[in-house]
Amino acid sequence: QVPKPLARERPLVLDGGLGTWLEFLGRDVSGQLWAARLLHEAPDALRSAHADFVAAGADVVMTATSQCSREALVALLDIDEEAAARLVARSVTLARDGTRAALRRLSQGSGGICGGGGGGGGRL
């Protein structure tokens, strides 16, 4: 059985271009672990970007974790593994909070889907 949020008559619209959008808004997205850095230094910018995507029509918002393995976070930010795990969890909270804020502004109540991004942890 398909979960209710996924059972729709139309295709789901994914968010897009987080780095491009953040750069447009004036954030520094240089370097291979820019998402990890912004997660640590500018969480409000990420939350706001997620809200912008939902306001533009996205049904699914991806967390800013495509570069965020624990090892990469520990190395980049000079934090311990527990703090790295908290940052990854924060990315989910930011995506969820941004989604909820946009839906409230749009008077659409609840909804939205939060997906987790994975990847090479910033290793090329």
Image (cartoon, rainbow, N blue to C red):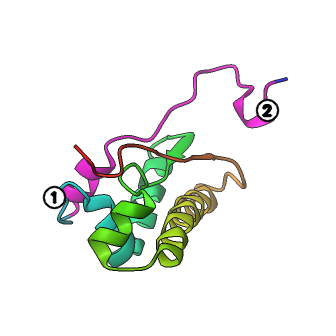
- The residue located at (44%, 49%) in the rendering is 53
> Where does residue 87 sit, x and y in percent of width and height?
48, 70
The quarter in which the N terminus is drawn is top right
Depth check, front residue: 68 or 62: 68
What residue is rendered at 25% in x and 60% in y? 34
Q: Which amino acid lies under the numbered mark 2 shown in the image of this protein?
A: Pro
Dividing the picture into quadrants, the one containing residue 124 is: top left
Looking at the image, the residue that sits furthest to the left is 30
Name the residue tied to disc 1.
31
The mark found on residue 123 in the picture is none
Q: Is residue 19 left or right of residue 47?
A: left
Compare marks 2 and 1 and give the one earlier in the sequence: 2
- Whether residue 45 can be seen here: no
Left or right, 62 with respect to 39, comes to: right
Q: Is residue 15 magenta?
A: yes
The local crowd at label 2, few if under 14, some if 14 to 19, many if 20 or more residues have their Cα within 10 Å, is few
For image coordinates 49% across by 40% down, the residue present is: 57
Residue beneath disc 2? 3
Q: Residue 75: horizontal and vertical position, in percent?
A: 30, 69
Q: CA distance from mark 2 to mark 1?
A: 37 Å
Residues shaded magenta: 2-25
Q: Is residue 33 magenta?
A: no
* Residue 89 x/y as whole percent: 57, 66
Secondary structure state at the residue bearing disc 2: loop
Given the current orientation, which residue lies at the most extreme right position?
Answer: 1
| Image marks 2 and 1: residues in contact by CB distance under 8 Å | no
The answer to whether 64 is drawn above or below residue 112 in the figure is below
Residue 68 versus residue 27 in the image, above or below? above
